[in-house]
Image (cartoon, rainbow, N blue to C red):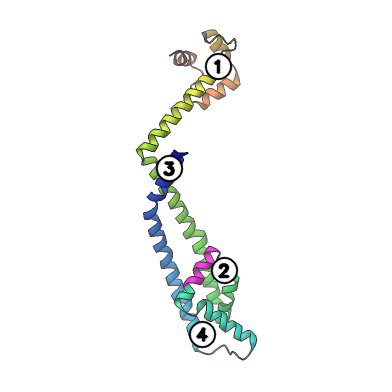
Amino acid sequence: VLGALRTLLHSLVSTVKTLVWALLLLIMIIYIAGVLFTQAAFEHLQAGRLSPNQDDEAKAIALLEKHWGSLGASAITLFQAISGGVDWDLVVRPLEAIGWIWMALFFLYLAFTLFAVLNVITAVFCQAAIDSAEHDKDMVLQSMIANKRMYEEQITRLFRDIDRDGSGFLTLTELKYRMKDDQVKAYLTSLGIDNADAWTLFKFIDT
């Protein structure tokens, strides 16, 4: 349990640098997109293309100002759209009043961020965690010890399975006879042992 916890903590610490660069990349994308959407919304509101005389138009103005009225609001909206903080259908509707091109740009932002950027970031995080675990000497040593013990247990189990008479000794005749069994052949193959070399296996178990 402590070994697994140590591996987890070591992997988290080793990915801090990757996390910082990933956040910077995401902030840059959100900032650039936020500037574009904020500028479009500001110009549209300043041009007075929406009149607040009617209820629907007043709601459209309110939503446009709430989600895209400032750079901060746009940045929050863009982040919420990719993190599940808000239904993106709700925030894209005000852009419809500005023009279809801005809706298309919003969909492009969503697709690029969700399917490309975030997936790449996830892959980089996983690879960084794997590399850190592979280069940690203590964890590599523990893994080798665990593999050795597992291998010894498997060989012992194989020996007991071959020793049908339960004498505690394995003769060459018993070994050759059991080597004809398909299950034994498959088991030896899984252990990386050439099942055609009965002498090598016999000497290995005998030592």
Q: Residue at x 52, y 64 (%)?
A: 82
Distance CA(mark 1)–CA(mark 3): 35 Å
- Residue corresponding to mark 1: 160
Of pointers 2 and 4, the one earlier in the residue sequence:
4
- Residue corresponding to mark 4: 44
Distance CA(mark 3)–CA(mark 2): 35 Å
Q: Residue at x 53, y 10 (%)?
A: 168
Where in the figure is residue 146, as x and y percent of width and height? 45, 30
Of pointers 1 and 3, the one earlier in the residue sequence:
3
Looking at the image, is 88 positioned above or below residue 116? below
- Residue corresponding to mark 3: 7
Q: Tell me which amino acid carries mark 1.
A: Arg
- Residue corresponding to mark 2: 86
Q: Tell me which amino acid carries mark 3.
A: Thr
Where in the figure is residue 52, as x and y percent of width and height? 59, 89
Residue stretch in magenta: 75-88
Q: Nearer the viewer, mark 1 or mark 4?
A: 1
Q: Nearer the viewer, mark 2 or mark 4?
A: 2
* Residue 62 visible from this viewpoint: yes
Decide: few, some or many residues near mark 3? Use Cα within 10 Å; few <14, some 14-19, many ≥20. some
